[in-house]
Image (tube, rainbow, N blue to C red):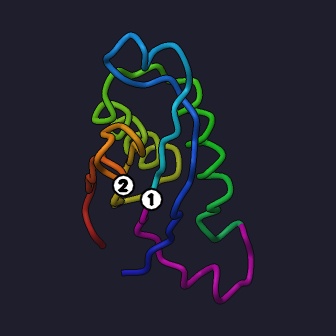
């Protein structure tokens, strides 16, 4: 299975359950792996046959910046659903991290897989 990935995508958004978290945007970090056959793009050297990681990144950024979820679990599910439906990705692994959420930890977050590996 071929994979296209995006690592360390940083996005600012309002997220969290506490009042102080709702007052100002916080940084989230997204790592994403997506199943995608690169054979056609490699053979044709045509971006139209590729999974355009810039377009995927821009769509994630727009969605996350506009979101106002309480939980990163909710946001992770929204991102996964969006990517699978809008970009026809059959399988993905998404890690959504919230740096600084726990003072003693570098980062906390969730990791999910959705779809069928091809």
For image coordinates 64% across by 62% down, the residue present is: 52
**Displayed quadrant of residue 72:** top left
Residue 43 image position (x, y, % from top left): 65, 89
Q: Single out the residue that lies furthest toward the bottom.
A: 43
- Cα–Cα gap, marks 2 and 1: 6 Å
For image coordinates 56% across by 54% down, the residue present is: 9
State the extent of the magenta-drawn residues as a range: 32-47
- Residue at mark 1: 31
> What label sits on residue 52 in the rendered view?
none
Q: Single out the residue that lies furthest toward the top.
A: 19
The crowd level at tag 1 (other Cα within 10 Å; few <14, some 14-19, many 20+) is: some
**Membership of 68 in magenta stretch:** no
**Displayed quadrant of residue 11:** top right
Q: Exactly how many numbered labels are in the figure?
A: 2
- Residue at mark 2: 94
**Displayed quadrant of residue 118:** bottom left
Identify which residue, 97 or 82, lies in the foreground: 97
**Membership of 43 in magenta stretch:** yes
């Amino acid at each position: 299975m071929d994979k296209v990935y995006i690592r360390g995508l940083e996005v600012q958004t309002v997220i969290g359950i506490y009042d102080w978290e709702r007052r100002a945007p916080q940084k989230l970090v997204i790592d994403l792996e997506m199943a995608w056959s690169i054979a056609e793009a490699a053979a044709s050297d045509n971006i139209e046959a590729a999974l355009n990681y810039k377009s995927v990144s821009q769509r994630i950024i727009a969605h996350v910046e506009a979101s106002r979820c309480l939980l990163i679990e909710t946001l992770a599910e929204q991102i996964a659903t969006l990517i699978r439906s809008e970009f026809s990705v059959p399988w993905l692994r998404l890690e959504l991290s919230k740096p600084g959420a726990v003072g003693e930890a570098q980062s906390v977050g969730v990791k999910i897989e959705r779809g069928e590996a091809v």
